[in-house]
Amino acid sequence: MFPALRSEIAGVSLRNVARRFGTPTFVYDAATIERKIDDLKAFDVVRYAQKACSNIAILDLMRRKGVVVDAVSAGEIHRALKAGFQPHAAAGAPHPIVYTADIFDRDALEMVLKHDIHVNCGSPDMLEQYGARKPGANVTLRINPGFGHGHSQKTNTGGEQSKHGIWHEQLDDCLRIADRHGLSVTGLHLHIGSGTDMEHLSQVCGAMEKLAADVGRTLTTISAGGGLPTIYQEGDTYVDVAAYYKLWDASRKRLEAQFGHKLALELEPGRYLVAESGYLVAEIRAIKKMGKNTFYLLDAGFNNLARPILYGSHHPMSIVPGPLDEVGTIAVDERPKADVIVGGPLCESGDIFTQAEGGYVCTRSLPTAQVGELLVIECAGAYGFAMGSNYNSKPYAAEVLLRNGQAHLIRARQTPDDLIRGEVIPV
């Protein structure tokens, strides 16, 4: 399914990308994102959870494909506006930007009010604070149905151990808060976590119907949330998108029959749209023997891609044959494989890309490689750059978008001066 050796992505030479932009660099294939958007065209509204990958060039691509966005901070609202999304919807159109959170920090509340951004409230306090400042507005409620799901406990966003959403038993209290401030609850949103399957989706649909009936006919939109799985390794499976839509559409139609008017059906994918488009291209800078183990050590670390250290996430990997300073095409030949541990440059024992949840170091069967060759960490488009850091004073990587056979720089690599911008030595 995933190649062990590769020389290009979408017809663009990876060695040329590395020579031109340096390493480590995130590379995104625009055609893959567009294809994943098309997968979901049956839904009335596809709302991108931009926290997965928020570069404004990616947001612009989404906008041009008719996708709207979710924002979880003032900064994400700012990004969406800079990418060309309008704060207000045309009559009958979905909200271009929705602010979804469990709290308002003060900056977010002021930005929401300034631009009249639609709000998806995830707590009674948030609803109270919004109603006090903007009585008479329309709002969406994010409900925690009392159960969740996730590929890791850290990505489970439902149930009583999750901080997300309004606890389902507090819905009536929130409706009274809304009434007190003249707020109209026009949307309902459920999201239980990542990697959901059809069994859990069926439970969510049932919960949505019951909760929507309690809210009543002020509703004009229901959101299925996100969490659609993506493929990271052999054995992973997608959700049957056609069956997924059919499940939600049936729930929507039953609610329409109750309310006597149409309901828009929204989906809120993040990882699903961008994960498979993204590649972290790094250079192998050392190969070390440590007892029985062999380590490939890269110039990329968990400051670039934190998913393995956070969740024990598996990412496919491939080797690009040939050193960077060698000109010309190098055939993607067959090579013997070895069981290796892949790590980064950081002063941290956990800086390992081949680990299981809990920090257990694993080996990976990869082609034998040489110092100076490239290693590509694949399916890295979601929660890669977006979760990056400057740990060890490492600069943020460059980001490159591939479109129609051309490589476009969409974020310059940080400079040393960028690293200390804003820092001051007091006199």
Image (tube, rainbow, N blue to C red):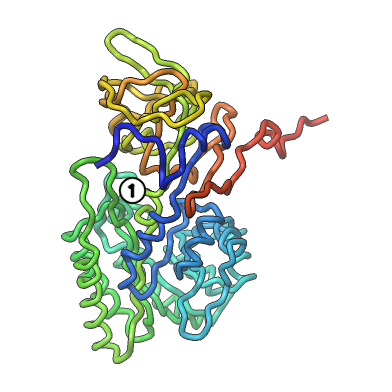
User: Residue 57's quadrant in the figure?
Assistant: bottom right
Q: Residue furthest top?
A: 291
Q: For numbered disc 1, what is the local secondary structure? A: helix
Q: Position of residue 418 (x, y in %)?
A: 68, 37
**What amino acid does circle 1 point to?**
Thr
Q: How far across and down, in percent of the image, does residue 33 sit? A: 40, 56
Q: Quadrant of residue 256?
A: bottom left
For the point 56% across and 40% down, the residue is 398
Q: On the rendered image, what quadrant is the C terminus found in?
A: top right
User: Which residue is label 1 attached to?
Assistant: 155
Q: Residues within 10 Å of mark 1 (few under 14, many from 20)?
A: some
Q: 9 or 165: nearer the eye?
A: 9
From this viewpoint, is residue 170 visible?
A: no
Task: Looking at the picture, tell me which residue is in the foreground, 359 or 247.
Answer: 247
Quadrant (top left, top right, bottom left, bottom right) of the N terminus: top left
Question: Left or right: 73 with respect to 218?
Answer: right
**Looking at the image, can residue 378 be seen?**
yes
**Left or right, 341 with reference to 398:** left
Residue projecting furthest to the bottom:
260
- Picture residue at 38% right of the left edge, 54% below the top: 32
Residue at the location (50% across, 67% down)?
64
Residue 232, quarter of picture:
top left
**Numbered marks: total:** 1
* Residue projecting furthest to the right: 427
Q: Position of residue 267 (x, y in %)?
A: 35, 67
Above-or-below relation of 146 to 365: below
Residue 268's x, y, as percent? 38, 63
Q: Is residue 109 left or right of residue 335?
A: right
